[in-house]
Amino acid sequence: MTFLLRRALFYLVTLWAAITANFLLPRLLPGDPVQAMITKLGGRLNSDAMASLYVLFGLDENKSIWEQYVDYWASLVRGDLGLSFTFFPTPVADVLSQSMPWTLGLVGVTTVIAFLLGTLLGVYAGWKRGSWMDNLIPITTFLSSIPYFWLGLIAISLFSVTWPLFPASGGYAPGLVPEFSGEFIGSVLEHAVLPGITIVVSSVAGWILGMRNMMVTVTAEDYVLVARAKGLTQKRIMFAYAARNAVLPSISGFALSLGFIVGGALLVEMVFSYPGLGYVLFQGIGAKDYPLMQGVFLVITLAVLVANLLADIGYLLLDPRTRREG
Amino acid sequence: MSPVLEIRDLSVDYGNLRAVHNVSLTLNAGEVLGLAGESGSGKSTLAYAATRLLQVPGKVPSGQVLFKGQDLLSLTDKQLQVLRWNEIAIVFQGAMNALNPVISVGTQIDDVLRTHRPQMKRPQRSARGRELLSLVGIPTDRLSSYPHQLSGGMRQRVMIAMALALEPEIVIMDEPTTALDVVVQRQILGQMMRLRETLGFSVVFITHDISLLVEFSDRIAIMYGGRVVEEAPASEIYRAAKHPYSQGLLGSFPALRGPRRELKGIPGSPPDLRSMPPGCPFHPRCPTAMDVCGERMPSLESVEESRRVACWLEDVRV
């Protein structure tokens, strides 16, 4: 228990540091977001409106950086992340909460699928080393070495242009209203097929390769030989003795990849114009939308921290050697 | 005495290299058969080949391993799986890595019972687990411990408890105490021998430490370069080993009982499988080598009742 408390404290400190960095970074950047806003609106603003924009974005110069920092925390606690320029005047928090489910649903689910599928294939490939499964590895490695945007574009040109099986972009058919109906959910799933499959195809190789190699290493361990001598079933030896030990490095890799779901969604969502966080970030960067970028970075930071915490807990459950007594 | 395990003309290849050459050995009921030799002499390979646990690329090109008249090498995988641990259990070097680090020792013992005694209910199995631990002198609450929470000696005892779970006919001990200190070594081996008297299994005891064999086994087979070079009752080997290699081995360990002697090593190093010397493989290191030793391989011949030696010194024809 003390171990968990110590970890929790560590995460709190990291969180504080990350949020502080998030506060400082835009203020260290050259340029002025309000100027960018003014340019975007084509200079149709008088000086009063400009002044109120500075106040609105919390950039009024009268305040010291310390006061700004305190204000930043106060508004963060209220869940107020400022207003987005791109989707002006929608609050950043609303933009994030609208796009978050799309990213988690698409990239989150496919990351989990890729991990489970790749690890399972890796277990078999490592256990039956030298079988036909080994031929799978160069193929999947080749697929994963294709740059993602290229893979995505090929998928679109093949499966939505040449053979129009799936829609090329968007999260659901235009004209539908997001609601809990069969038609809407069907449309969401249809739109998720191409981006989902391309994510799995491009990331599964890493899991297969990592798991296969660990399986080969672990299979040579004495305890696997003992398990065979004990006359246990092949299934029991493969999973409880070999894979159970071989999966440990993959678990931490998996937790880290969960943290990168949000950041990693950028390319996928750009290629497929998918309405998730990555696409929002892409639009925000294009428009120098600092509040939005800050919001997305905050979410990414939180995601990485939560993923690390999950990795810690997962390791604690799976590897008794990491449980410290006393 | 009736034989429980008969190894007949067993050879083992690793690719093109022959690691074990036409070895024949018999384990009698209730007996402790010692198997001695330096690293690479083929003693463990022989044991793994006999129990069909060889890892690839190990292969058995010829030979038979008869257990109660059944050839283990021709059993189907299913038959073999049923026979494993039920009849032949192995005590590995548990102090090292023979226990699965992420599963509690209780579960590892339970695995054996669950696989081989499907009719046993969970409470019966855990009762049996506790019984086995107390048999080897470990507090029964250690059942839920993980291997890293146990000392090397305790892990070795857990290995023994696990080996006895199904009351096997034969227990093969492969360097069971090599990583342990001398005091714990004798405690564990002493305990093992007492258990053997009460439970009545036969033991194949593999080690490089011939002084342990002299003390704990009935009969000793000494291997060199993948061949048995001498086989005799333990007391005979200790009193008057006939093969120069056996004499060398005995001279390299301090005797734990009996008068003090000067320790001598064996000069040179064990032969490389890839370039075995012609004739007797031991002749380059042998203090009594003759011309014939470098030319022809001596065969393993009976020189007395229950005593076999492969050495030209013992051959009346030379």
Image (tube, coloured by chain):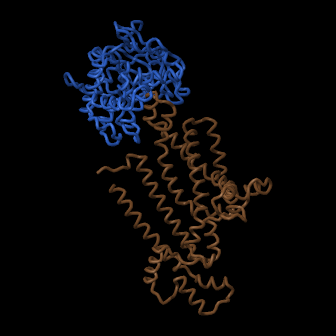
Chain colours: A brown, B blue
Q: Is A299 located above or below residue B188 in the figure? A: below
Q: Position of residue B197 (x, y in %)?
A: 28, 18
The quadrant in which residue B45 appears is top left
**Residue found at the far right of this picture:** A162
Residue placed most toward the observer, B106 or A125: B106
Q: Position of residue A164 (x, y in %)?
A: 78, 55
Residue A147 seen in the current view: no
The quadrant in which residue A91 appears is bottom right
**Residue found at the far front of this picture:** A181
**Residue found at the far left of this picture:** B259
Count of marks placed on residues: 0
Name the residue located 58 percent from the left edge and 54 percent from the top edge.
Answer: A109
Residue placed most toward the observer, B1 or A72: A72
Residue A187 seen in the current view: yes
Q: Which part of the image, by quadrant, shows the N terminus of chain A?
A: bottom left
Q: Is A46 located above or below residue B89 in the figure? A: below
Name the residue located 49 percent from the left edge and 76 percent from the top edge.
Answer: A23
**Residue found at the far bottom of this picture:** A47
Name the residue located 52 percent from the left edge and 23 percent from the top edge.
Answer: B78
For this view, does B22 lie left or right of residue B248? right
Q: Position of residue A125 (x, y in %)?
A: 58, 39
Name the residue located 63 percent from the left edge and 82 percent from the top edge.
Answer: A36
Q: Is B204 located above or below residue B268 in the figure? A: above
Residue placed most toward the observer, A55 or B264: A55
